[in-house]
Image: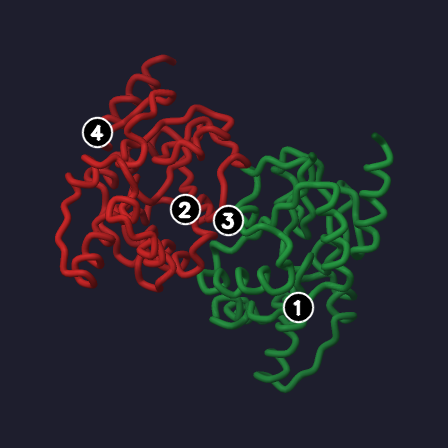
Chain colours: A red, B green
Amino acid sequence: MKRIAIDMDEVLANPNLRFLEWYERDYGVKITEAQLYGMGQKFYEYVDNHDLRNYLHIKGFFKDLPLMPDSQEVVKWLAEHYEIFIVTSAMEFKYSMEDKYDWLQKYFPFLPWKNFVFCGRKDMIIADYLIDDHVKNLTGFTGEGILYHAPHNLDNTEFTRVKNWQEIKAFFEKELAKF
Amino acid sequence: MKRIAIDMDEVLANPNLRFLEWYERDYGVKITEAQLYGMGQKFYEYVDNHDLRNYLHIKGFFKDLPLMPDSQEVVKWLAEHYEIFIVTSAMEFKYSMEDKYDWLQKYFPFLPWKNFVFCGRKDMIIADYLIDDHVKNLTGFTGEGILYHAPHNLDNTEFTRVKNWQEIKAFFEKELAKF
Protein backbone atom coordinates (compact mmCIF):
# COMPACT_ATOMS: atom_id res chain seq x y z
CA MET A 1 0.00 0.00 0.00
CA LYS A 2 1.49 3.34 -0.99
CA ARG A 3 1.79 6.07 1.60
CA ILE A 4 0.55 9.67 1.55
CA ALA A 5 1.88 12.20 4.06
CA ILE A 6 -0.53 15.08 4.62
CA ASP A 7 0.29 18.43 6.20
CA MET A 8 -2.19 20.07 8.59
CA ASP A 9 -2.14 23.89 8.49
CA GLU A 10 -3.59 25.35 5.30
CA VAL A 11 -4.19 21.82 4.01
CA LEU A 12 -6.51 20.09 6.50
CA ALA A 13 -7.07 23.01 8.85
CA ASN A 14 -7.52 26.70 8.16
CA PRO A 15 -5.37 28.88 10.45
CA ASN A 16 -5.90 31.94 8.22
CA LEU A 17 -9.45 32.25 9.50
CA ARG A 18 -8.12 32.28 13.09
CA PHE A 19 -5.57 34.97 12.10
CA LEU A 20 -8.32 37.08 10.57
CA GLU A 21 -10.55 36.54 13.62
CA TRP A 22 -7.86 37.52 16.12
CA TYR A 23 -6.68 40.42 13.99
CA GLU A 24 -10.16 41.89 13.84
CA ARG A 25 -10.52 41.33 17.60
CA ASP A 26 -7.19 43.03 18.39
CA TYR A 27 -7.01 45.75 15.73
CA GLY A 28 -10.63 46.28 14.71
CA VAL A 29 -9.87 45.73 11.03
CA LYS A 30 -11.77 43.18 8.98
CA ILE A 31 -9.87 41.42 6.20
CA THR A 32 -11.23 38.63 4.01
CA GLU A 33 -9.57 35.42 2.88
CA ALA A 34 -9.99 36.58 -0.71
CA GLN A 35 -7.83 39.61 0.07
CA LEU A 36 -5.08 37.29 1.35
CA TYR A 37 -5.08 35.33 -1.89
CA GLY A 38 -5.03 38.59 -3.81
CA MET A 39 -1.81 39.65 -2.08
CA GLY A 40 0.03 36.34 -2.37
CA GLN A 41 1.55 36.51 1.10
CA LYS A 42 1.39 35.08 4.59
CA PHE A 43 -1.15 36.93 6.71
CA TYR A 44 1.39 38.64 8.94
CA GLU A 45 3.23 39.82 5.84
CA TYR A 46 0.00 41.03 4.27
CA VAL A 47 -0.85 43.30 7.18
CA ASP A 48 2.84 44.27 7.46
CA ASN A 49 2.95 43.36 11.13
CA HIS A 50 5.34 40.52 11.77
CA ASP A 51 4.50 40.56 15.46
CA LEU A 52 1.30 38.84 14.44
CA ARG A 53 3.34 35.73 13.84
CA ASN A 54 3.45 35.54 17.65
CA TYR A 55 -0.20 34.51 17.52
CA LEU A 56 1.19 31.09 16.60
CA HIS A 57 2.95 30.89 19.96
CA ILE A 58 -0.18 31.65 21.98
CA LYS A 59 -1.93 28.70 23.58
CA GLY A 60 -5.27 28.23 21.89
CA PHE A 61 -4.39 29.54 18.44
CA PHE A 62 -4.57 26.03 16.96
CA LYS A 63 -7.60 24.97 19.01
CA ASP A 64 -10.68 24.03 16.98
CA LEU A 65 -9.41 25.49 13.72
CA PRO A 66 -11.95 25.32 10.90
CA LEU A 67 -11.65 22.37 8.53
CA MET A 68 -10.68 22.88 4.92
CA PRO A 69 -13.79 22.00 2.85
CA ASP A 70 -14.19 18.31 1.96
CA SER A 71 -10.96 17.32 3.71
CA GLN A 72 -12.61 14.78 6.03
CA GLU A 73 -14.49 12.98 3.29
CA VAL A 74 -11.58 12.85 0.87
CA VAL A 75 -9.03 11.72 3.51
CA LYS A 76 -11.48 9.00 4.53
CA TRP A 77 -11.68 7.87 0.92
CA LEU A 78 -7.88 8.06 0.52
CA ALA A 79 -7.44 5.92 3.65
CA GLU A 80 -9.22 3.09 1.85
CA HIS A 81 -6.53 3.06 -0.82
CA TYR A 82 -3.40 4.44 0.84
CA GLU A 83 -1.61 4.47 4.16
CA ILE A 84 -2.17 7.98 5.51
CA PHE A 85 0.30 9.87 7.69
CA ILE A 86 -0.33 13.32 9.11
CA VAL A 87 2.99 15.17 9.12
CA THR A 88 2.87 18.63 10.62
CA SER A 89 5.48 21.23 11.57
CA ALA A 90 4.60 21.60 15.24
CA MET A 91 8.01 21.95 16.86
CA GLU A 92 8.32 25.68 16.38
CA PHE A 93 5.10 26.17 18.33
CA LYS A 94 5.18 24.26 21.58
CA TYR A 95 1.59 25.03 22.47
CA SER A 96 0.28 23.82 19.15
CA MET A 97 0.91 20.17 19.95
CA GLU A 98 -1.91 19.30 22.34
CA ASP A 99 -4.37 21.33 20.27
CA LYS A 100 -3.27 19.65 17.04
CA TYR A 101 -3.55 16.24 18.67
CA ASP A 102 -7.09 16.95 19.93
CA TRP A 103 -8.05 18.35 16.56
CA LEU A 104 -6.92 15.23 14.73
CA GLN A 105 -8.71 12.97 17.22
CA LYS A 106 -11.88 15.03 16.77
CA TYR A 107 -11.98 15.41 13.01
CA PHE A 108 -10.01 12.39 11.82
CA PRO A 109 -10.78 9.69 14.41
CA PHE A 110 -10.46 7.02 11.72
CA LEU A 111 -6.71 7.68 11.38
CA PRO A 112 -4.44 5.86 13.86
CA TRP A 113 -2.44 8.10 16.21
CA LYS A 114 0.55 5.94 15.34
CA ASN A 115 0.56 7.74 12.00
CA PHE A 116 0.72 11.27 13.40
CA VAL A 117 4.11 12.96 13.12
CA PHE A 118 4.84 16.31 14.78
CA CYS A 119 8.15 17.54 13.45
CA GLY A 120 10.23 20.51 12.37
CA ARG A 121 11.12 19.48 8.82
CA LYS A 122 9.87 16.86 6.40
CA ASP A 123 12.90 15.71 4.45
CA MET A 124 13.37 12.70 6.74
CA ILE A 125 9.90 11.24 6.11
CA ILE A 126 9.50 8.14 3.99
CA ALA A 127 6.32 8.42 1.93
CA ASP A 128 5.26 8.22 -1.70
CA TYR A 129 3.41 11.53 -1.72
CA LEU A 130 3.41 14.68 0.40
CA ILE A 131 0.54 17.16 0.23
CA ASP A 132 1.79 20.46 1.65
CA ASP A 133 1.36 24.20 1.14
CA HIS A 134 5.05 24.99 1.71
CA VAL A 135 7.42 24.67 -1.23
CA LYS A 136 10.37 24.27 1.17
CA ASN A 137 8.78 21.09 2.55
CA LEU A 138 8.18 19.63 -0.90
CA THR A 139 11.68 20.50 -2.13
CA GLY A 140 13.52 18.23 0.30
CA PHE A 141 10.91 15.47 0.22
CA THR A 142 12.00 12.18 -1.36
CA GLY A 143 8.60 11.25 -2.85
CA GLU A 144 6.21 13.17 -5.10
CA GLY A 145 5.28 16.60 -3.83
CA ILE A 146 1.76 17.99 -4.27
CA LEU A 147 1.38 21.70 -3.59
CA TYR A 148 -1.78 22.81 -1.83
CA HIS A 149 -2.76 26.22 -3.18
CA ALA A 150 -2.16 28.96 -0.59
CA PRO A 151 -1.61 32.74 -0.61
CA HIS A 152 2.17 32.34 -0.08
CA ASN A 153 2.81 29.85 -2.92
CA LEU A 154 0.89 31.32 -5.85
CA ASP A 155 3.91 31.73 -8.12
CA ASN A 156 5.31 28.20 -7.80
CA THR A 157 5.05 26.07 -10.91
CA GLU A 158 7.48 23.31 -9.91
CA PHE A 159 4.93 21.03 -8.25
CA THR A 160 1.49 19.70 -9.10
CA ARG A 161 -0.91 22.26 -7.64
CA VAL A 162 -4.23 21.35 -6.06
CA LYS A 163 -6.73 24.06 -5.17
CA ASN A 164 -9.04 22.05 -2.94
CA TRP A 165 -9.76 18.54 -1.69
CA GLN A 166 -11.87 17.65 -4.71
CA GLU A 167 -8.81 18.23 -6.88
CA ILE A 168 -6.82 15.96 -4.55
CA LYS A 169 -9.44 13.27 -5.00
CA ALA A 170 -9.29 13.66 -8.77
CA PHE A 171 -5.47 13.46 -8.68
CA PHE A 172 -5.47 10.20 -6.74
CA GLU A 173 -8.29 8.70 -8.80
CA LYS A 174 -5.95 9.08 -11.76
CA GLU A 175 -3.02 7.65 -9.79
CA LEU A 176 -5.07 4.62 -8.80
CA ALA A 177 -6.22 4.10 -12.39
CA LYS A 178 -2.56 3.71 -13.45
CA PHE A 179 -2.28 0.29 -11.81
CA MET B 1 26.93 14.00 6.99
CA LYS B 2 25.33 10.79 8.19
CA ARG B 3 22.26 10.96 10.39
CA ILE B 4 21.59 9.38 13.79
CA ALA B 5 18.04 9.18 15.14
CA ILE B 6 17.95 8.94 18.92
CA ASP B 7 15.02 7.81 21.05
CA MET B 8 14.24 9.62 24.33
CA ASP B 9 12.71 7.35 26.98
CA GLU B 10 15.16 4.84 28.44
CA VAL B 11 17.85 6.17 26.09
CA LEU B 12 18.30 9.89 26.88
CA ALA B 13 15.84 10.13 29.78
CA ASN B 14 15.07 7.72 32.57
CA PRO B 15 11.32 7.23 33.07
CA ASN B 16 11.89 4.13 35.22
CA LEU B 17 13.06 6.31 38.09
CA ARG B 18 9.80 8.30 37.85
CA PHE B 19 7.82 5.04 37.85
CA LEU B 20 9.67 3.86 40.95
CA GLU B 21 9.19 7.25 42.63
CA TRP B 22 5.43 7.39 41.97
CA TYR B 23 4.97 3.73 42.84
CA GLU B 24 6.59 4.22 46.22
CA ARG B 25 4.49 7.37 46.74
CA ASP B 26 1.23 5.60 45.84
CA TYR B 27 1.82 2.07 47.18
CA GLY B 28 4.51 2.52 49.84
CA VAL B 29 6.76 -0.09 48.25
CA LYS B 30 10.35 0.68 47.35
CA ILE B 31 11.81 -1.08 44.31
CA THR B 32 15.25 -0.49 42.85
CA GLU B 33 16.32 -0.16 39.23
CA ALA B 34 18.55 -3.21 39.70
CA GLN B 35 15.45 -5.27 40.54
CA LEU B 36 13.86 -4.16 37.25
CA TYR B 37 16.84 -5.37 35.27
CA GLY B 38 16.77 -8.63 37.23
CA MET B 39 13.22 -9.31 36.07
CA GLY B 40 13.65 -8.37 32.45
CA GLN B 41 10.29 -6.59 32.13
CA LYS B 42 8.63 -3.24 31.86
CA PHE B 43 7.99 -1.74 35.28
CA TYR B 44 4.21 -2.16 35.15
CA GLU B 45 4.72 -5.79 34.21
CA TYR B 46 7.23 -6.29 36.98
CA VAL B 47 4.86 -5.13 39.70
CA ASP B 48 2.01 -7.01 37.97
CA ASN B 49 -0.15 -3.91 37.88
CA HIS B 50 -0.88 -2.81 34.35
CA ASP B 51 -2.89 0.13 35.62
CA LEU B 52 0.47 1.68 36.39
CA ARG B 53 0.90 2.18 32.69
CA ASN B 54 -1.68 4.94 33.14
CA TYR B 55 1.05 6.95 34.88
CA LEU B 56 2.24 7.67 31.34
CA HIS B 57 -1.03 9.47 30.60
CA ILE B 58 -0.81 11.76 33.62
CA LYS B 59 0.39 15.31 33.01
CA GLY B 60 3.78 15.72 34.63
CA PHE B 61 5.04 12.15 34.34
CA PHE B 62 7.57 13.17 31.70
CA LYS B 63 8.49 16.47 33.36
CA ASP B 64 12.12 16.82 34.42
CA LEU B 65 12.97 13.14 34.00
CA PRO B 66 16.50 12.27 35.09
CA LEU B 67 19.12 12.14 32.35
CA MET B 68 20.78 8.87 31.43
CA PRO B 69 24.43 9.17 32.52
CA ASP B 70 26.81 10.79 30.01
CA SER B 71 24.03 11.27 27.43
CA GLN B 72 24.51 15.05 27.16
CA GLU B 73 28.27 14.89 26.66
CA VAL B 74 28.15 12.06 24.14
CA VAL B 75 25.29 13.55 22.11
CA LYS B 76 27.21 16.82 22.00
CA TRP B 77 30.22 14.95 20.69
CA LEU B 78 28.10 13.02 18.16
CA ALA B 79 26.59 16.28 16.91
CA GLU B 80 30.06 17.33 15.76
CA HIS B 81 30.23 14.34 13.43
CA TYR B 82 26.63 13.47 12.59
CA GLU B 83 23.28 15.09 11.99
CA ILE B 84 21.28 14.29 15.14
CA PHE B 85 17.51 13.75 15.21
CA ILE B 86 15.51 13.06 18.35
CA VAL B 87 12.72 10.66 17.43
CA THR B 88 10.36 9.80 20.25
CA SER B 89 7.05 7.95 20.50
CA ALA B 90 4.97 10.71 22.03
CA MET B 91 1.64 10.27 20.24
CA GLU B 92 0.24 7.67 22.60
CA PHE B 93 0.68 10.09 25.49
CA LYS B 94 -0.78 13.46 24.65
CA TYR B 95 0.49 15.13 27.81
CA SER B 96 4.05 13.99 27.24
CA MET B 97 4.60 16.38 24.35
CA GLU B 98 5.07 19.75 26.06
CA ASP B 99 7.16 18.11 28.81
CA LYS B 100 9.36 16.33 26.30
CA TYR B 101 9.81 19.53 24.35
CA ASP B 102 10.82 21.48 27.47
CA TRP B 103 13.13 18.67 28.52
CA LEU B 104 14.95 18.68 25.19
CA GLN B 105 15.28 22.46 25.24
CA LYS B 106 16.70 22.29 28.78
CA TYR B 107 19.15 19.43 28.43
CA PHE B 108 19.99 19.48 24.73
CA PRO B 109 19.82 23.18 23.81
CA PHE B 110 22.52 22.65 21.20
CA LEU B 111 20.19 20.51 19.07
CA PRO B 112 17.87 22.38 16.67
CA TRP B 113 14.13 21.96 17.34
CA LYS B 114 13.77 21.35 13.63
CA ASN B 115 15.30 17.94 14.30
CA PHE B 116 12.80 16.87 16.95
CA VAL B 117 10.24 14.31 15.81
CA PHE B 118 7.29 13.30 18.00
CA CYS B 119 5.67 10.29 16.41
CA GLY B 120 3.93 6.98 16.94
CA ARG B 121 6.18 4.68 14.92
CA LYS B 122 9.66 4.95 13.47
CA ASP B 123 9.61 2.96 10.25
CA MET B 124 8.98 6.11 8.20
CA ILE B 125 12.12 7.91 9.39
CA ILE B 126 15.09 8.33 7.06
CA ALA B 127 18.31 7.99 9.06
CA ASP B 128 21.51 5.96 8.96
CA TYR B 129 21.29 4.82 12.59
CA LEU B 130 18.57 4.55 15.20
CA ILE B 131 19.43 4.19 18.90
CA ASP B 132 16.35 2.80 20.66
CA ASP B 133 15.42 0.49 23.53
CA HIS B 134 12.47 -1.07 21.68
CA VAL B 135 13.15 -3.97 19.35
CA LYS B 136 9.87 -3.21 17.50
CA ASN B 137 11.22 0.22 16.54
CA LEU B 138 14.52 -1.15 15.27
CA THR B 139 12.86 -3.96 13.31
CA GLY B 140 11.00 -1.70 10.90
CA PHE B 141 13.77 0.89 10.67
CA THR B 142 15.52 1.19 7.30
CA GLY B 143 19.01 2.04 8.66
CA GLU B 144 21.20 0.31 11.24
CA GLY B 145 19.51 -0.34 14.57
CA ILE B 146 21.39 0.00 17.85
CA LEU B 147 19.64 -1.47 20.88
CA TYR B 148 19.93 0.46 24.12
CA HIS B 149 20.05 -2.04 26.97
CA ALA B 150 16.81 -2.01 28.99
CA PRO B 151 14.92 -4.39 31.30
CA HIS B 152 12.43 -5.35 28.56
CA ASN B 153 14.98 -6.21 25.84
CA LEU B 154 17.55 -8.35 27.66
CA ASP B 155 17.07 -11.45 25.51
CA ASN B 156 17.45 -9.77 22.10
CA THR B 157 20.58 -10.69 20.18
CA GLU B 158 19.55 -9.39 16.76
CA PHE B 159 20.89 -5.86 17.16
CA THR B 160 24.14 -4.29 18.38
CA ARG B 161 23.56 -3.75 22.10
CA VAL B 162 24.88 -0.73 23.97
CA LYS B 163 24.69 -0.61 27.76
CA ASN B 164 25.42 3.07 28.30
CA TRP B 165 26.47 6.24 26.50
CA GLN B 166 30.16 5.47 26.76
CA GLU B 167 29.52 2.33 24.72
CA ILE B 168 27.65 4.47 22.17
CA LYS B 169 30.66 6.77 21.95
CA ALA B 170 32.96 3.77 21.44
CA PHE B 171 30.65 2.39 18.73
CA PHE B 172 30.68 5.62 16.74
CA GLU B 173 34.41 6.16 17.21
CA LYS B 174 34.82 2.88 15.35
CA GLU B 175 32.29 3.90 12.71
CA LEU B 176 34.10 7.18 12.12
CA ALA B 177 37.43 5.39 11.87
CA LYS B 178 36.08 3.34 8.92
CA PHE B 179 36.16 6.33 6.60
Q: Which residue is mark 3?
A: B119
- Are there few (<14), some (14-19), or many (20+) residues within 10 Å of tag 1? many
Callout 1 amino acid: Asn
- Relative to A36, say whether A131 is above or below: above
Q: CA distance from mark 2 to mark 4?
A: 23 Å
Q: Nearer the viewer, residue B157 or A35?
A: A35
| Chain of the residue displaying label 2 | A
Position of residue A116 measured from the top left corner of the image (x, y, whole percent): 44, 46
- Considering only order in the chain, which callout, 3 or 1, is on the residue closer to the N terminus? 1
Callout 2 amino acid: Pro
- Relative to A78, say whether B83 is above or below: below
Marks 1 and 4 on same chain: no
Seen as rendered, the residue at the extreme front is A48
Q: Nearer the viewer, residue A157 or B21?
A: A157
Q: Which residue is mark 1?
A: B16
Q: CA distance from mark 1 to mark 4?
A: 48 Å
Marks 2 and 4 on same chain: yes
**Circle 2 sits in a helix, a strand or a loop, which is it?**
loop
Q: Which residue is mark 4?
A: A166
**Circle 1 sits in a helix, a strand or a loop, which is it?**
helix
- Relative to A75, say whether B76 is above or below: below
Which quadrant of the view contains residue A134? top left
Q: Which residue is mark 2?
A: A112
Marks 2 and 1 on same chain: no
Callout 3 amino acid: Cys
Position of residue A37 measured from the top left corner of the image (x, y, whole percent): 21, 36
Q: CA distance from mark 1 to mark 3?
A: 21 Å
* Residue depth check, mark 2 versus mark 3: number of the one nearer the observer: 3
Q: Residue at x 73, y 48 (%)?
A: B147
* Residue depth check, mark 1 versus mark 4: number of the one nearer the observer: 4
Callout 4 amino acid: Gln
